[in-house]
Image: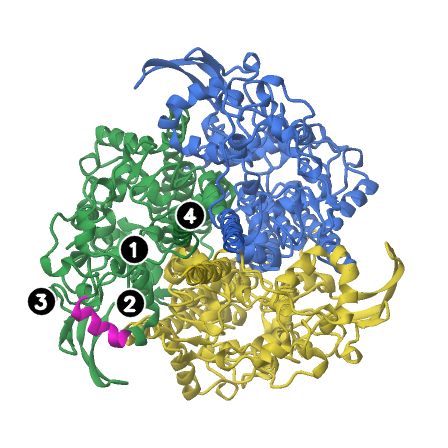
Chain colours: A blue, B yellow, C green
Amino acid sequence: MAGNSKGKIRAGIMALLQALSMLCLVSAVPAETAAPVSVETAVCLECHETLHPGIVRDWRKSRHALTTPGDALRKEGLRRKVSSTQVPQRYKENAVGCAECHTMRAASHGDSFEHNDFRVHPVVTPADCAVCHVQEHAQYGRNLMAYARINLLENPLYMDLVRQINGSPTWNGTRISISRPERETNRDSCSFCYGTLVEMKGLETRETDMGEMSFPVLSGWPNHGVGRFNPDGTKGTCAACHTRHRFSIAMARKPHTCSECHKGPDVPAYAVYRVSKMGNVYAAQGASWDFNAVPWKVGRDFSAPTCAACHVSLLTGAEGQVLAERTHTMSDRLPWRLLGLVYAHPHPASPDTSRIKTPGGLSLPTDLEGKESRSFLISPREMADRRRRMMAICGACHARSLSDGHFRRLEHTVKTTNRATLAATGIMRTAWREGLAKGPDAGDSPFNEPLEKKWVEQWLFYANSVRLATAMGGADYGVFANGRWYLSRNIREMQALLEDLRARKAGRVGGR
Amino acid sequence: MAGNSKGKIRAGIMALLQALSMLCLVSAVPAETAAPVSVETAVCLECHETLHPGIVRDWRKSRHALTTPGDALRKEGLRRKVSSTQVPQRYKENAVGCAECHTMRAASHGDSFEHNDFRVHPVVTPADCAVCHVQEHAQYGRNLMAYARINLLENPLYMDLVRQINGSPTWNGTRISISRPERETNRDSCSFCYGTLVEMKGLETRETDMGEMSFPVLSGWPNHGVGRFNPDGTKGTCAACHTRHRFSIAMARKPHTCSECHKGPDVPAYAVYRVSKMGNVYAAQGASWDFNAVPWKVGRDFSAPTCAACHVSLLTGAEGQVLAERTHTMSDRLPWRLLGLVYAHPHPASPDTSRIKTPGGLSLPTDLEGKESRSFLISPREMADRRRRMMAICGACHARSLSDGHFRRLEHTVKTTNRATLAATGIMRTAWREGLAKGPDAGDSPFNEPLEKKWVEQWLFYANSVRLATAMGGADYGVFANGRWYLSRNIREMQALLEDLRARKAGRVGGR
Amino acid sequence: MAGNSKGKIRAGIMALLQALSMLCLVSAVPAETAAPVSVETAVCLECHETLHPGIVRDWRKSRHALTTPGDALRKEGLRRKVSSTQVPQRYKENAVGCAECHTMRAASHGDSFEHNDFRVHPVVTPADCAVCHVQEHAQYGRNLMAYARINLLENPLYMDLVRQINGSPTWNGTRISISRPERETNRDSCSFCYGTLVEMKGLETRETDMGEMSFPVLSGWPNHGVGRFNPDGTKGTCAACHTRHRFSIAMARKPHTCSECHKGPDVPAYAVYRVSKMGNVYAAQGASWDFNAVPWKVGRDFSAPTCAACHVSLLTGAEGQVLAERTHTMSDRLPWRLLGLVYAHPHPASPDTSRIKTPGGLSLPTDLEGKESRSFLISPREMADRRRRMMAICGACHARSLSDGHFRRLEHTVKTTNRATLAATGIMRTAWREGLAKGPDAGDSPFNEPLEKKWVEQWLFYANSVRLATAMGGADYGVFANGRWYLSRNIREMQALLEDLRARKAGRVGGR
């Protein structure tokens, strides 16, 4: 009996120990074990862990340091994050470390340089990431963002706008003239988000703690713009959203990432989200959500969508059924391109919009009266497909009658804001016709005179803001913050300015 | 002795087990047990848990799913959240689930429809919530917000402003004309926050996974505006702040909820709060506060007020003494209505402001020179009472001399900003009198010409912003962000524009 | 054997208990033991814990309540936060409580008053804090912020700008006139951040729960402006950033604190940070960082800089090496003063900028053509030193070629934005010369006419915004939000307005 008793006690203690160890798992900070690092990465870490503790520590917390491509490949079904079916053997059983990303495909990288017996390239590109993430790379390649720089540079109208914004003004006592924008200005302005051209300009020698060493001189650097031209000939950078060196899916899913480029009045998606019901739920409760779960389970992992949920992520429902496929072609669920240039219109059919032309030869998807250049745009059927994909996500929380109502309202707003742009463009064209402003027909920029600036704000700021406010349910932004109030004020001021210009011309008092 | 020893060991193990279970409560995520659901709700959940996992999961985390009205009624004193003294027997011992809210009072709901043998209404209203929360419903009914839609629709001046903002412009080569705003535009603009008219327009049949089914067609839907007209004849929606289907007191207490409607330049309460010392404390430390505690204990549960703390919540001090009663009449602690229309003034005596008229017949609480229509406004004594109620909250952290100084400053700002509005209105009235702009006396809108737009911004944007910045200690917003700088710039521009108009009229060069 | 067995069991249980207690330390909220309080503080707490639970609770969570200066002095090396080598014996072994701060140096405090046998001063000043934090006090004394009020009050140009912004307008039917700003307005505007003059105006008697008592009447109160004039003759307040009564280093390290004064369009540091990559990392991951660690270890404690990391904090690397010394002279790592008044320029050599004069007698660091008054500004060598100090911080995460690229871009932006200011100033000087606007030469303010207002916005809003956007990598703010778009639009509007004024003068139609 004593033995029996002792046995029971022993069993009880074992149970306790077990309970304790389980408890430890729950209560302690999750202590994941690092994956083994390659010999090459170990060499990198030897110095760089001390030199750049910030990024190395960040990497150590990243999935890249905690697992191996081999293990990642062994994950089954929707939990799998590596989309390549094969990963080269040499990368398979080590962490994805410094050497893996910064020395692979060395021959292709124009910025690679000799560094302690390695051929290292500072600029890691989507082609590097594609070794493991081939599908995401392919999807992103069909994304407008990958073409951001091309679409800007090869569009003469856009480049004229860039020039008017980024050029340096000089006053000669009578009038302002604008110089061509300097390269460094463009890199710090439009190209910051659209992407710079990163080029290797040679090597420079620097005295370091490890003696004299050579380092590449890069132009257009730093930059993490979405359509960056890389020294290996590729476009874009995954680090725009999956910030190096954590490469976090959680961070990319949070709206702050998108806000880096989508907060200003031209495309105020984040500003609208913040005052929407969904944005409120995120702000108030997001701290308790699981932003790392793959797939991302509606209700279980999160309660209200962030930008990524609607536009990018793989989402599943209560029983694991797929509500939305993962896509890095961000417009896959977007029938309309709300960012009006000049008018909102069905999304472009190809991500390379530099080829789009109106019958009249303008590099725009619609002419100045709003007529769409249909052949360059997606079809009504494709629009319906995209809307259906989006509504499948709405459906995870909302009855169909609600989302029907929402999209009806959006279509209505597209129509009315385009009408407001038409009226503003009407004033503008009257001014050009009557010689009160000099437009393209007079061989001048349509973006440099005060009346033209107001015209630009009408569609680029106010109409866009109103549309985004409708699309994401953030009316506070769409009325007084930067929306309908300004839309209606601006057009009255355009009329008044036109009248001033007419009066000036008629009275010939002074000249503009 | 062995027995005794064994007994001690057993007692020790029991103590350990107890300690462990206590520990579990502390360290694990609080695993509250769900309350029993009614048969009816169980039927709903059978399909909807799969169809709409987002909202069902949210509801499962809500208090409504975790307790029963019966248990809630048994809570004593200030901890009690259910204010009705009786709850119908049939709702008492089950969770407050789908069927409870969406089928109760079916006969009153114009939007109820036959759905799998239930009579379901999609639009849950304050009258439904009032079954358990009768006092909050009554308080909210005395709230300006409940009357938001009425106060807008029945005020001809406000409706003229709505028209000028929401109407669609057309350019005929000479001038802009504005159409009457379309309904869908209003729903997406002012009515988004003020509330739409939600109406049942009939049924539509849709093919679903469960076969063909009928669903209501609702106009004015979706909407969660504070003064919504509901299909059961009631006004408002509790879900404006207590977001469905979590109905969280924590979320309503966080400032992001208020920001959905109070961030724009007309009423930038959230924008001011963000740069105030209190907003900073919330941003930096709020993650560690208890937003669910009832009553809300100053110092213990939170360290700096959010919007709700000052305007809504039941607050207690260190020894449980009540510092502020719970109120859903948001102006209960507000002597002044800082939102100047046109001038800041003592709060309206009745939440129904549509009846307010100046002696001259304007639908405003003050005439255009700022003279208050006293009979419609609260008395100086009531103002003092409200100030005292607010200062009791300040007193939880601040000495009286500090809050005295604060409120002295606020009174001063009300006076000086009203003076700035008076000057701007003086320019405006000069323009109307001299025929330089067409105002109400000339049968025209006071809100459509460029000078009038500037006048509106003077009081609606800049004076309001300055006052809110003072009221909540966010001077950064009240100076350069959208305050005194613009207040002073705008009035100079108004003068210059008036001079232009005079010059134009005198010189007869062109015409406006 | 049974005994042995029992012994083992007992040992096992002891081990378990030990494990449990360790576990408690991990899983429970860290329950730090309060330090002993002085008899005097105990007396304060007796009433004030009940009267002001908010601040007392906050203090109880503060380091001041949890440790004693004596213990703090015994900390070794970089972990030490108290910089005084000696602390008076009487303060050494008690918590830093109410009485310690609010009664020390009573004789020096003009606001001290008799209160229950204590001589209490409400306004705690940097000289009080310096008893323990002598170095921080000395550093802050060399900070521009400590001189904020002086530098404003004693600069006639700045005071003219204050007057134009804060004065009250009156309309007499023909023109606007501006009164001298009232004191209370200034306190609620510029002085809110720059600091008020806090003065003891006497005592007032109030009925309290403890009977009739006397309290000081303070003017200029409340205020926590960085350059406040205190009743003990000192300048500034530590509570501007280390919010009373928590005095938290964590809060001061978070960017929201800086945003209280640095978010508006004149100095939009926080707004830029929010859309920068660094701001994104903070927003997405900051909740898991250790903001209390001293020293602040890059990578280990945090992954991306906040304002404090780059401008104030003591930072160490992976092996404890110092990357940046702690400084409360905020410009220690700043070569350029980006806040252009009128032009961006090398930082002032002395924090007292009131003595700066151009050769022409303007109270500005550059003349109106941008020529620097070199003798008042730091030398190129000092600029290089400061840049080097900042780049040592960049180096914790970034390769040298990246930070070189970044700073090259910043220098470029300083140059181009100064050029844009030069062009705008050219228009302005043309207008003054031709009598189209009345400037200082005509004995009038350079800040009151519409053209002058536009000139101010050119440098104060747009050029500053562009520079801050470059400096912190937040291009979204620097282009459309409040940057280059407006910079380029504004100068065109300035030209158009100048032409209007010329036309008016030539035609003599009306007069301005």
Instruction: Name the chain under label 2.
Output: C
Residue highlighted by disc 1: C242
Q: Which residues are magenta?
A: C38-48
Tell if the residue under mark 2 belongs to the same chain as the one under mark 1.
yes
Q: Looking at the image, is mark 2 or mark 1 nearer the viewer? A: 1
Q: Marks 4 and 2: which is nearer the front?
A: 4
Local crowd size for mark 3, using a 10 Å CA cut-off: few (<14), some (14–19), many (≥20) = few
Q: Nearer the viewer, mark 4 or mark 1?
A: 4
Q: Does B202 appear above or below C383?
A: below
Question: In the rendered image, which residue does mark 2 sit on?
Answer: C222
The answer as to whether the residues below labels 4 and 2 share one chain is yes
Distance (Cα) linking label 3 and label 2: 22 Å
Q: Secondary structure at mark 1?
A: loop
In the foreground, A159 or B149: B149
Q: Is residue A380 left or right of residue C171?
A: right
Q: How many marks?
A: 4
- Location of mark 4 (residue): C1
